[in-house]
Image (cartoon, helix red, strand yellow):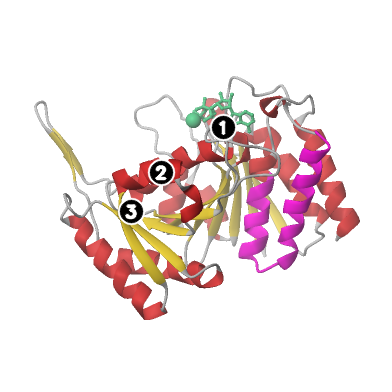
């Protein structure tokens, strides 16, 4: 197993080392391949990521990624989008689960669901035309693209409560009829119970009744918006991890960005990045991944927390404590 480790920019440089310390505590046979990509690299060399870097990433099995600050150059091609495309990471996964003692905007903590977002087509097809007086973007929905994301969601539903919610807007967007039909057919084939929701009602329902959902599957743009919204249910951007998964590769990144406003101070919350390590271990089929939940519950309970949660601990201190808990309880 080879893991590319990309700290990137800003707080990525703080949270990733903390997460790697936790990963190391598991003592797995794993070769880490550090890569320096991003804005800082672009400033010093003129490229944020080279062809050679892409080949190096492809020689690994998975990627642990911090954050890259967007390069202020119109010709810049997003590092993240390029990696997603090159590795064909078609499923974007966001677990939305409260952490002990922390409540988000709704004040509730009785939910535990996962948003599965199709990551390669929909309105992010990149097929666009921009004229002086009009512009359009093609919204692509294919049977193949819908099938593989529906299968992914059904596999996951089988491992959880066997319930799937399909989110779409097929009353207005004809392109969503295919997505909805394919998801329904796939769920039938898997024997998964399902319901469907229009995306606008879903946005409301997720805030009012997040406890009703388990596995949610949707197209690219809807998933992008809903999953960011749901970070507010959990409480802090510093607490939410994500994974991008394909047939061959997997890529793990905290939901937050490089947060230049707090970078370099050692106060960023590493919990999102540490939860990325949990997702990585789960992807590797390691049941000991669950120790990370216990370790995080322990630091939260002892108030070893960063300023975003009202504490005074540093990024590194939280990382050390979580790693120590893992070492002692493994
Ligand atoms: P980028 O352009 O790279 O996305 P950004 O300025 O949008 O950077 P984000 O990382 O998206 O910043 O975060 C928005 C705000 O949330 C930050 O300004 C920061 O104060 C806070 N924040 C984000 N992540 C964390 C974290 N891990 N710990 C503490 N605060 C965080
Ligand atoms: Mg941001």
Q: CA distance from mark 3 to mark 1?
A: 33 Å
Q: State the residue position of label 2.
A: 226
Say which label, 3 or 1, has the lower sequence index.
1
Compared with residue 84, is residue 256 higher up or lower down, i.e. above or below? Answer: above
Q: Is residue 308 above or below residue 98?
A: above
* The N terminus, quarter of image: bottom right
Of the 4 image quadrants, the one containing the C terminus is bottom right
User: Label 3, on which residue?
Assistant: 219
Please name which of the two marks, 3 or 2, marks the residue nearer to the observer.
2
Q: Which residues are magenta?
A: 274-303
Rendering quarter of residue 136: top left
Say whether residue 295 is magenta: yes
Nearest the camera: 137 or 226?
A: 226
Q: Is residue 15 left or right of residue 119?
A: right
Residue lying at 84% horizontally and 42% vertically, measured from the top left:
321
Looking at the image, residue 307 lies above or below residue 78: above
> Residue 80: horizontal and vertical position, in percent?
47, 43
Marks 1 and 2, how far apart at CA: 32 Å
The label shown at residue 41 is: 1
Residue farthest to the top, as pictured: 261
Magenta stretch holds residue 277: yes
Residues at badges 3 and 2 in contact (C-beta under 8 Å)?
A: no
């Amino acid at each position: 197993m080879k893991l590319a480790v990309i700290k990137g920019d800003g707080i990525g440089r703080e949270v990733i080392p903390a997460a790697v310390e936790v990963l190391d505590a598991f003592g797995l046979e794993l070769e880490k391949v550090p890569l320096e990509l991003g804005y800082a690299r672009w400033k010093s060399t003129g490229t944020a990521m080279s062809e050679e870097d892409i080949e190096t990433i492809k020689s690994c099995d998975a990627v642990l990624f911090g954050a890259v600050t967007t390069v202020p150059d119109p010709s810049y091609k997003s590092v993240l989008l390029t990696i997603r495309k090159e590795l064909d990471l078609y499923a974007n996964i966001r677990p939305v689960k409260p952490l002990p003692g922390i409540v988000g905007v709704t004040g509730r903590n009785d939910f535990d669901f996962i948003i599965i977002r199709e990551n390669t087509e929909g309105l992010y097809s990149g097929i666009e035309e921009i004229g002086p007086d009009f512009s359009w973007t093609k919204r692509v929905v294919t049977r193949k693209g819908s099938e593989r994301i529906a299968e992914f969601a059904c596999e996951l539903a089988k491992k959880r409560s066997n319930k799937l919610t399909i989110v779409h807007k097929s009353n207005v967007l004809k392109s969503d009829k295919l997505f909805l039909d394919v998801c329904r057919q796939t769920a039938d084939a898997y024997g998964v119970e399902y319901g469907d929701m229009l995306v606008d009602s879903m946005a409301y329902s997720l805030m009012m009744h997040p406890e009703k959902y388990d596995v949610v599957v949707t197209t690219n743009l809807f998933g992008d918006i809903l999953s960011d919204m749901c970070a507010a249910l959990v409480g802090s951007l510093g607490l939410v991890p994500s994974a991008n998964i394909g047939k061959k590769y997997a890529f793990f990144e905290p939901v937050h960005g490089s947060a230049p406003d707090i970078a370099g101070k050692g106060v960023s919350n590493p919990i999102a990045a540490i939860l990325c390590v949990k997702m990585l271990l789960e992807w590797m089929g390691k049941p000991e991944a669950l120790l990370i939940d216990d370790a995080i519950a322990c630091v939260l309970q002892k108030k070893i927390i960063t300023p975003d949660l009202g504490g005074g601990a540093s990024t590194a201190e939280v990382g050390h404590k979580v790693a120590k808990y893992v070492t002692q309880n493994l």
